[in-house]
Image: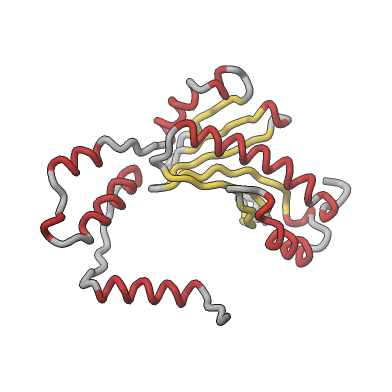
Amino acid sequence: MDTKSSAHYQRLYRQRLREQGLVKKEVWILPEHAGHLLALERKLRQPRTGLVSPEMTEAMSMTPIWTAQTLCSALAGTELISSGQASLELIQGADASLHLTMHDYGDLPLFMGVYGEQIVVEAMLWPASAVTDSARFNDEVLRSHKLFPLSSIGLEQRADGQDYYSMFGALSSASTLSDVVFEIELLADNVIKATEAYENFLKASI
C-alpha cells in the first residue's frame, strides 16, 4: 500500500472545500469563544437555507465553554479536591492556568490550561539530559505510546533553556466536568506507568 504523508491529505481536504464553493476567512475572537466559532463555522458551510436560526444561536450560547477560572471553580467542588486526593491552585497571568498536586500519586504536579477549543493537562517527566541514549529512547516512545491511552509524550524547552520530556492529554473545552476529572486522573496514572516503563533509559542519579 502506498503510504502518503499527512500533508497530502491536508491538500485534498482543502481542495474538497474549495470545490464546494467555500472560502477561507480569518477572524479574531476571544479564546473562550473558540468552541462557539467552530459550531458556527460548520453551520455556515451549509447552503443559505441552512443559515443560523435564532434557535440555533440560543442553543450555541448555552454550550458551556470552560475558561481557566470557571474550570477552577468547578473542580474545587469535585470529590477529587474536596476529599483531599488532590489540591488545586489558579495561576493568574496573561494566560491563566491551573496547578494540581496529586497527593495520591506522591504529590505529582500537573498543569492545566484552556486554549481556545481545547483543554491541555500536562506533567513534566524528566529533563532530556537525564536520558542515557536519546535516539533509542525516542524510538521506544514512538513504538510504545499506545500503552498510555489518551496521553502523549512530547519534548519541549522550558524557561531555563533546557529540554524536558512531558506527558500530556487534551480534550474539548466543552467537555463535561466528569470527563475533565477523568483526564486528570488518567494522566497522573499514565505518568507513573511511563516512569516505570522507561526507567531503564534514565540515568541512575535522576
Quarter-of-image position of residue 12: bottom left
* Extreme residue toward the right, this view: 204
Quick one: 183 or 130, which is closer to the camera? 183
Q: How is the image coloured?
A: secondary structure
Please tell me whether residue 32 is drawn above or below residue 152 in the rendered image.
above
Q: Residue at the far bottom: name it.
A: 2
Query: Going by the picture, which residue comes out furthest to the top?
Result: 83
Q: Is residue 130 left or right of residue 84?
A: right
Quarter of the rendering containing residue 177: top left
Is residue 30 depicted above or below 129 in this figure? above
Expressed as whole percent of the image width and height from the top left, the position of residue 69 reads: 41, 31
Residue at position x 61%, y 34% in the image: 185
Q: Which of 165 and 38 is in front in this view?
A: 38
- Residue 7 position, x and y percent, is 47, 74
Please give the name of the residue rendered at 47% of the width and 43% of the height, measured from the top-left corner.
119
Q: How many marks?
A: 0
> Eyeballing the image, is 127 above or below 48?
above
| Position of residue 186 in the picture relative to residue 77 (left or right) | right
Looking at this rendering, what residue extends furthest in the front direction? 1
Q: Which residue is drawn at 24% across and 64% down?
A: 25
Is 189 in front, or is 97?
189
- At which x and y percent is residue 28? 27, 54
Question: Does residue 4 lie above or below 73 as drawn?
Answer: below
| Foreground of the two, 83 or 31 | 83
Left or right of 30 on screen, residue 178: right
What is the x, y in percent for residue 57? 18, 43
